[in-house]
Image: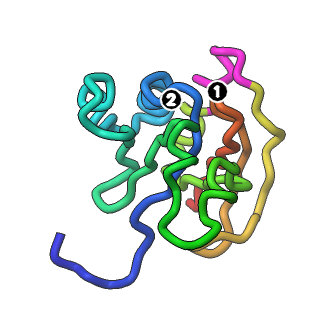
Amino acid sequence: MTDNTTRLDHVVLWVNDPVAAAGFYEKNLGFEPLRVTEYAAGTVSFPSVRINEETILDLAPHSMAARMRMLPGADAGAGHPVNHVCVALPAHDFDALRARLQEQSVPVSDLSHDSYGARGTARRSFYFGDPDGNIIEARHYE
């Protein structure tokens, strides 16, 4: 990618089992797993999943928290989950995701309508949790 405009690059989620987390995101959201084999072999610290061409989720094991010392005190906050991550999908994929989650008995919230987001007002959205308790919001705009 040669476009160097400001954009979101990645979000780090704290997970108990990075390989299982990668499988969850691949199976349910269709995110491409990255570096899972390397993580399992012990050659990288964590795997990731690709959301799109320019954005990934890093799936960091809780054991990495003690190594978070990029700034004084950063390790004290490491391991705490974010409030939620939101993914925007086309309407058809949104409906398919909700159906897949319900088929697997993954609890989902009621639908919300007309909520504000990065692209304006989303028509519908809902929330669900991953196996590690991270909250994901799914939405569609059109």
- Residue at the far left: name it: 2
In the rendered image, the quadrant that contains the C terminus is: bottom right
From the image, tell me which residue sits under label 2: 21
From the image, tell me which residue sits under label 1: 131
In the rendered image, the quadrant that contains the N terminus is: bottom left
Q: Is residue 105 magenta?
A: yes
- Residue stretch in magenta: 98-106
**Cβ atoms at labels 1 and 2 below 8 Å apart:** yes
Who comes first in sequence, dot 1 or dot 2?
2
Q: Could you tell me residue 104's position as x and y percent? A: 64, 15
Q: CA distance from mark 1 to mark 2?
A: 7 Å
| Residue 31 in the image: above or below residue 124 | above
Number of marks in the image? 2
The secondary element bearing badge 1 is classed as loop
Using residue 12 as the reference point, say whether residue 26 is left or right of it: left
Q: Main secondary structure of the magenta part?
A: helix
In the foreground, 5 or 35 = 35
Q: Amino acid at mark 1?
A: Pro
Q: Could you tell me residue 25's position as x and y percent? A: 48, 33
Q: Quadrant of residue 83?
A: bottom right
Q: Which residue shows up at 59% across the image and 72% down it?
A: 72
Q: Which residue shows up at 63% across the image and 25% down it?
A: 101
